[in-house]
Amino acid sequence: MSFLLPLLFVVLNLASSITNGDDHHKFVYNGFTGANLSLDGTAMVTPNGLVELTNDGIRLKGHAFYPSPLQFRNSPNGTVQSFSVSFVFGIIPIFSDLNSGHGISFVVAPSKNFSDAIPAQYFGLFNSETDGNSNGHIFAVELDTVQNREFKDINDNHVGIDVNSLTSLKSYPAGYYDESGMFRNLSLVSMEAMQVWVDYDREATQINVTMAPLHMAKPVKPLLSASYNLSELLMEPAYIGFSSSTGAAGARHYLLGWSFNINGPAPAIDIAKLPKLPTVGPKSDPSKKLKIFLPIATAAFLMAVGAAIFLLVRRRMRYAELQEDWEIEFGPHRFTYKDLFHATEGFQNKNLIGAGGAGRVYKGTLIGSKQDIAVKKISHNSKQSMKQFVAEIVSIGHLQHRNLVRLLGYCRRKGELILVYEYMPNGSLENFLYGQDGKCTLDWDQRFKIIKGIASGLLYLHEEWEKVVIHRDVKPSNILLDNEMNAKIGDFGLSRLHDHGANLQTTHVVGTIGYLAPEIALNGKVSPLADVFSFGILALEIICGQKPVKQNAQGVQHTLVDWVLEHWHKGSLVDAVDANLQTGYDIAEVRLVLQLGLLCSHPSGQSRPSMRQVMQYLNGDMPLPETFLTHPDFGMFHLLQERVSNLSAMSYPSLA
Ligand SMILES: *[C@@H]1O[C@H](CO)[C@@H](O)[C@H](O)[C@H]1NC(C)=O
Ligand SMILES: *[C@@H]1O[C@H](CO)[C@@H](O)[C@H](O)[C@H]1NC(C)=O
Ligand SMILES: *[C@@H]1O[C@H](CO)[C@@H](O)[C@H](O)[C@H]1NC(C)=O
Ligand SMILES: *[C@@H]1O[C@H](CO)[C@@H](O)[C@H](O)[C@H]1NC(C)=O
Ligand SMILES: *[C@@H]1O[C@H](CO)[C@@H](O)[C@H](O)[C@H]1NC(C)=O
Ligand SMILES: *[C@@H]1O[C@H](CO)[C@@H](O)[C@H](O)[C@H]1NC(C)=O
């Protein structure tokens, strides 16, 4: 007896293939035994003729397409004609009382290849990049069993009309309107077979979606109706089919029958001939359900307890910080680690705005005050000098000048010191000097303003505050720019950090090659004049748009100072200016800054001006020294050039 049954289905299926025979615009499948469908993923035809799009597994996707493409237009430039689809589906969730997913969608698409699509909430139709992309040319009707806020889903049991995105054009809870116009809800995961109709009207450019329990005639009033001109969406030709996916919990998604027609109603599906949905669902076997559920529930409970403990411990660890009695007086400058953690969204890499030998810098926003901050994490290991160091940070925090980046406070953890600065939206000068395609986009006024700003900030550090603060690392990446392109010096005073052994980097050189005054390299002598030297180099760099030390293909180093001097020597000083400036500059100002840059980067400290004098030269309150202008000591500079080359060839000992 049993061998007769498959035979019967084959005969039935033959009937359906005859119907779709050579007319590609009309077909009906009353069950799918022997049907020629394009299947992929987990999709398969079961022995009794169901299309099983997914099984119980998690994160699966399966597609079933009509194998050949369809012509939706009757001429290449015509509009998409009216069409009509009907299908019967059933969903068997793995747990009847758990949200399992994700549902079935009927789809019209330019291709059958959905290998790039993602399962779960993406339905095996899209991924995070393709969802919402108007180049998708995808029309779908989703039967969605999971509420996904990302796609503004209304609930976990709805029908939606989708155009290029799972954020539906229109959606409504699953159900139908009965003869009296009353809405009756249906549960998609009820394990009952249900029928859906999708009708498109070419004149009205209207899409209707209707659904009903299996044995009911098509309701008069559609569940959903949307106005959309599919001529503007669909590619020609297009494929039609179904897609299903599962997420964290599995569900079996089945198709029982399917019919399609262009310019006419979809052929009626013969309900009597449809294969039956499997009955071995969770509903029919409560003892099995209990067997599955008890261990799962127990395990889940234990995991929940474990997770709670883990979370508590992690919370303590995550926000743990070091705080000692002596810090009480610094209270107002102390940030809690928790606040900084939340401000930077857990120090996520997407918030990383800088990283270097000295630490990593993150952008953050304080939750309460909404203030933007830059958070610098430095690893440190020294206990002894911490107190002195923190006192220093706090005193640095008192420095206030329009050309200095404010240090707002600090936080301490085991092995880690965290400094909180005001946030500079325009980032560092380095980005502007060698930004896109290595070209400097700053105009002359901006460059001159930046140079004056740096000079003014350094003057404050050297002479105008109660203590002398030597920066020791003046270079483009330490100059930050605010909204109005004012220069603000960052990281000042912190070179002392290295003295306190706070940095784990053992071979860290305080200062950067190219900006390092020769006397520091030679005998470690640090004075404000070392900052003047770096300032001079930086000023030349800003005007010439070139790095202080360059290496040619033969490995020979050229300093920027040398290059500018050469131009001066040849009487073509202004040719040293960055070509990107063209002629948009004041020649007198350019000459002044180039010569001042050279004067500041004089190899002999005594020959350099103080920052106060630099300000006077820049403001035109005082001319550059006559002797320097008439007898620049070129020989002395060349000596320097040699020394710098020799030095940078050596491996640096720690100079701090
Ligand atoms: C299935 O359909 C495709 C596309 O129409 C066709 O190329 C192929 O020969 C068909 N296969 C069978 C077994 O009919
Ligand atoms: C279709 O439109 C294109 C350009 O819009 C035109 O070049 C072509 O001749 C049209 N074809 C027909 C059959 O009308
Ligand atoms: C489907 O597309 C992917 C790339 O998107 C490609 O690698 C793959 O070969 C395609 N598969 C088929 C069967 O065309
Ligand atoms: C329909 O909705 C009512 C109330 O919202 C609910 O009690 C009932 O279970 C639902 N029926 C189905 C089949 O989902
Ligand atoms: C859609 O439904 C409305 C009634 O709500 C009906 O007037 C219209 O003809 C239907 N369109 C299609 C294409 O079935
Ligand atoms: C639909 O769009 C097509 C192509 O843009 C256009 O030719 C046609 O007139 C539109 N149909 C309606 C009813 O607006």
Image (cartoon, grey):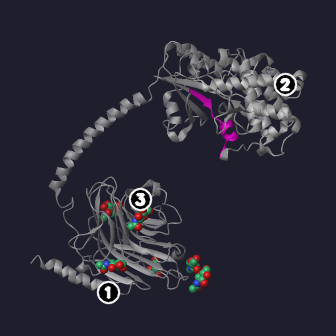
Q: Is residue 434 magenta?
A: yes
Left of 535 or right of it: where is 7?
Answer: left
Image quadrant of residue 596? Answer: top right
Q: Is residue 230 visible?
A: yes
Graded by Cα atoms within 10 Å as few (under 14), some (14 to 19) or many (20 or more), the crowding at tag 3 reads: many
The CA distance from mark 2 to mark 1 is: 99 Å
Left of 617 or right of it: where is 463?
Answer: left
Question: Magenta stretch?
Answer: 419-436
In the rendered structure, which disc, 3 or 1, sits on the residue that comes first in sequence? 1
Graded by Cα atoms within 10 Å as few (under 14), some (14 to 19) or many (20 or more), the crowding at tag 1 reads: some
Residue at (73% x, 44% y) in the render: 441
Which amino acid, mark 2? Pro
Left of 144 or right of it: where is 584?
Answer: right
Residue 634 or 404: which is nearer the viewer?
634
Q: The C terminus appears in which quarter of the rendering?
A: top right
Graded by Cα atoms within 10 Å as few (under 14), some (14 to 19) or many (20 or more), the crowding at tag 2 reads: some
Identify the residue position indicated by label 1 in the image. 19
601 shown above or below 193: above
Q: Is residue 361 magenta?
A: no
Identify the residue position indicated by label 2 in the image. 632
The CA distance from mark 3 to mark 1 is: 34 Å
